[in-house]
Image (spheres, grey):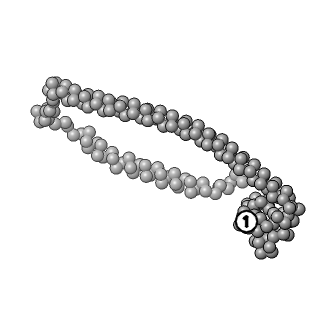
């Protein structure tokens, strides 16, 4: 295999040759101009226009004006930084106050939810302890959604006894509501 050429070596050589030629052309195009400029003599000193110079007092005044403008900008920036620091402090303080208020509100809501849940449990126990015939008359008078909430909390035996005492239409409506309560609950 030592006598065979590896594929792609000839193409690589051609590409390298093209790059070298391109570089030589670019260098060669600027060489003539550079040589022509180096042969030219500089103009005599009497033909060169004098450079306009400001007087030292004018230069000092210009520098003083610029220093005053820079000092004014720096002062304005310092004032803005101080105002931003105050605003940042006020925002931080307000955020801390809001977090404390939110924590208090959560505690209050937890108490209210707990109290409401206790009330519902107590009322459910009362309805369960009633005679099924009397409870059925009460549940017939309730809205179906309200009645379904209590029946879903009761033991199956107590709920069945109350449903059997209700009118068939109302019992069916309440049953549909209880059966469809968790239809939209995610399964995963």
In the rendered image, the quadrant that contains the N terminus is bottom right
Which residue lies most toward the bottom here?
169
* Residue at figure coordinates x 43%, y 52% from the top left: 22
Density class for disc 1 (Cα within 10 Å; few <14, some 14-19, many ≥20) is few
Q: Quadrant of residue 34?
A: top left
Taking depth in this image into account, of 35 and 148 the one nearest to the observer is 148
Q: Quadrant of residue 110?
A: top right
Q: Is residue 15 left or right of residue 176?
A: left
In the rendered image, the quadrant that contains the C terminus is bottom right
**Residue 76 in the image: x percent, y percent?**
32, 32
Task: Indicate the secondary structure of the residue bearing disc 1.
Answer: loop
Return the residue at label 1: 142
* Residue at figure coordinates x 15%, y 24% from the top left: 57
Residue 17 seen from this side: yes
Q: Quick check: 75 above or below 160?
A: above
**Residue 112 in the image: x percent, y percent?**
67, 46
Q: Is residue 188 left or right of residue 31?
A: right
Which residue lies most toward the right here?
157
Residue 172 seen from this side: no
**Residue 70 in the image: x percent, y percent?**
29, 30
* Residue at figure coordinates x 14%, y 32% from the top left: 52
Q: How many marks?
A: 1
Taking depth in this image into account, of 8 and 164 the one nearest to the observer is 164
Taking depth in this image into account, of 3 and 115 the one nearest to the observer is 115
Taking depth in this image into account, of 170 and 90 the one nearest to the observer is 170
* Residue at figure coordinates x 47%, y 35% from the top left: 90
**Residue 145 in the image: x percent, y percent?**
72, 65
């Amino acid at each position: 295999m030592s006598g065979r050429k590896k594929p792609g070596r000839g193409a690589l050589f051609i590409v390298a040759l093209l790059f070298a030629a391109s570089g030589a052309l670019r260098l060669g195009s600027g060489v003539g101009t550079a040589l022509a400029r180096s042969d030219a003599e500089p103009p005599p000193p009497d033909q060169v226009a004098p450079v306009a110079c400001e007087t030292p007092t004018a230069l000092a005044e210009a520098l003083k004006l610029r220093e005053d403008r820079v000092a004014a900008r720096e002062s304005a920036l310092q004032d803005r930084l101080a105002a931003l620091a105050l605003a940042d402090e006020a925002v931080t303080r307000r955020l801390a106050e809001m977090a404390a208020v939110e924590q208090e509100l959560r505690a209050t809501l937890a108490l209210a939810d707990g109290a409401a849940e206790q009330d519902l449990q107590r009322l459910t126990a009362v309805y369960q302890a009633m005679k099924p015939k009397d409870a059925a008359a009460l549940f017939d008078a309730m809205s179906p959604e309200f009645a379904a909430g209590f029946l879903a909390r009761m033991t199956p035996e107590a709920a069945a006894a109350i449903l059997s005492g209700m009118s068939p239409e109302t019992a069916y409506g309440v049953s549909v509501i209880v059966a469809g309560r968790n239809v939209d609950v995610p399964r995963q």
